[in-house]
Image (spheres, helix red, strand yellow):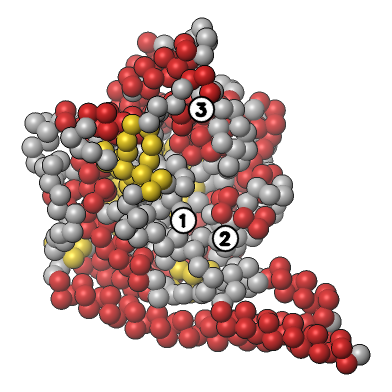
Amino acid sequence: MMLSHRVGRACHVLVLVLCLSAAEDFDWSANNHDSFYYGTFPNGFSWGAGSSAYQTEGAWDKDGKGLSIWDVFTHKKGKTFLNDTGDSSCEGYYRIKDDISLMKELNLNHYRFSISWPRIMPTGIRSDHVNEKGVKYYDALIDDLLEHNITPIVTLYHWDLPQVLQEKYGGWQNISMINYFNNFASLCFERYGDRVKHWITFNNPWSAAVEGYETGEHAPGLKLRGTGAYRAAHHIIKAHAKVWHTYDTQWRNKQRGMVGISLSGDWGEPVDITNQKDIEAAERYVQFYIGWFATPIFHGDYPQVMKDFIGRKSAQQGLGTSRLPTFSSQEKSYIKGTCDFLGVGHFTTRYITQKNFPSNRGSTYFSDRDIAELVDPRWPDPGSEWLYSVPWGFRRLLNFIKTQYGNPMIFITENGVSEKMLCTELCDDWRIQYYKDYINEMLKAIRDGVNVKGYTAWSLLDKFEWDEGYSERFGLYYVDFRNKNKPRYPKASVQFYKRIIKFNGFPNQREVENWKRKATETCSTSNQLLAAEEQRNTAANILRLIHDPLTSHMEMVTEVVVPTVCTLCILISAVFLMFLLRKRN
């Protein structure tokens, strides 16, 4: 094992010891990590893919859209890989019909997307202005989805807070965000609720709080160590509850929809399952992550272990009160039960062990937990440095949720894997393997009695990946970001996922192995076509380079973001040709 380079997501392990008798249908002590189950999902199981507004829409300043915190953050140098921005990204704002045709090719049952708050409320404040052009964009998207029998699952907040609210009030550090967000949600219910029946208030609030207000890796880029994340999360939880109650009292009877939240949670396994300190450390890992948000929503208050650890460390620092805010008794009752379904985003697993962080060295969210995260070097990691393929953790996480939160209705809202490579590659066999293994673990969890109703592959398209820019690709479809038209090309995983959907699972070994073979054959042809297109584009660039060496070279450098090996060779030849031409002159 080795130390992980990035803080992973969290899950619960104390259940291994405490809940064995309560979860008799799942054997927590079993180590059947490599077994594969051939079978199908329940009738009516919903298959989908997902996206988010800032990552895919582009059109950052078009048709009356206001600035978001991500617009401002990415326009500051040094905040993202190669200073990439989401200004144009996939140009999804202009490609509704094209992208729905991709969904139809996959035979998706649902599509998960988010509404950009500043696109329909430029300042974030309803009384200031409602941008009807933005409203109409989502009207068209929803109508086109329904016309093609694809159910919209709509996220209200996927991190793109209106910049005005950040500048005026400090964003999620300020309690006033609760009412502003509720007004935004109310407008969405009013305009779209006659057609949208599945609402998600927040996507992965852990990242919004920790990476936005603790580490500063994400917008708005604040580093309020030890306090910022807890305060932001406190207001987000209250905002979620208020929106749920607004829908429940004003819209549910008319619209008959559901309101949930999407929480990220990755499994935490004790390094030594017989060591009590490791078991307790793994408990803290989950409770400081998914439990931070799920426990108040399902049980009314923060996890006891969070209150104990943060309170103790705050006292050791000489603080009069805990850095973790508290809910009043009235707020606990108001928040408890505000979840019609739980969205779960899951990607990877960590091994967890005890590690003490003395309070006199300063406290952060991470040091408050007193844990160390480890990974097994044998775990595949084709893309993001934090994302290791550990399928068996998925089933364990889902069984934990079943036991801990009373077996709620679950939709998998994010699950997928990235690649990070120099070459264009449509034959993504590692993604096929990832989806095959993770979806199979989800099927096993359903057989265990977990109430999973749908699955969302993350993501439909390659897109802007936050601080990593365009250096990582999660999509089923490859997007050529160098081409102003942003063409989409199917990867092999499209064909494989399409067959899982068609057969509603894994009918038998021979059939599934045949899927992979056919997918690989198809992508080989697509790879050749894409490579030929790239070579044509590169040849055109070289002609411009020869004609006007300096300006054309500068232009080409901005266009070539992720060159293929072939392109690199041509570029080297072009530079050499420039040298010869200049020498001759």
Amino acid type of the residue that numbered disc 2 sits on in the rendered structure: Tyr
Residue tagged 2: 470
Residue tagged 1: 384
Residue ranking furthest to the top: 320
> Are dots 1 and 3 in contact, CB under 8 Å?
no
Foreground tag (2 vs 1): 1
The disc, 2 or 1, on the residue closer to the chain's N-terminal end is 1
Query: Judging from the image, what secondary structure is the residue with disc 1 in?
Result: loop
Foreground tag (3 vs 2): 3
Residue tagged 3: 364
Tell me the quarter of the picture where residue 146 sits.
bottom left
Label 3 Cα neighbours within 10 Å, binned few <14 / some 14-19 / many ≥20: many
Q: Position of residue 472 (x, y in %)?
A: 51, 60
Amino acid type of the residue that numbered disc 3 sits on in the rendered structure: Thr
Amino acid type of the residue that numbered disc 1 sits on in the rendered structure: Ser
Can residue 291 be seen here? The reply is no
Distance from disc 3 to disc 2, alpha carbons, whole Å, reads 30 Å
Give the left or right position of residue 280, taking residue 331 as reference.
left
Can residue 279 be seen here? The reply is yes
Observer-nearest residue: 524 or 284?
A: 284
Label 2 Cα neighbours within 10 Å, binned few <14 / some 14-19 / many ≥20: many
Residue ranking furthest to the right: 585
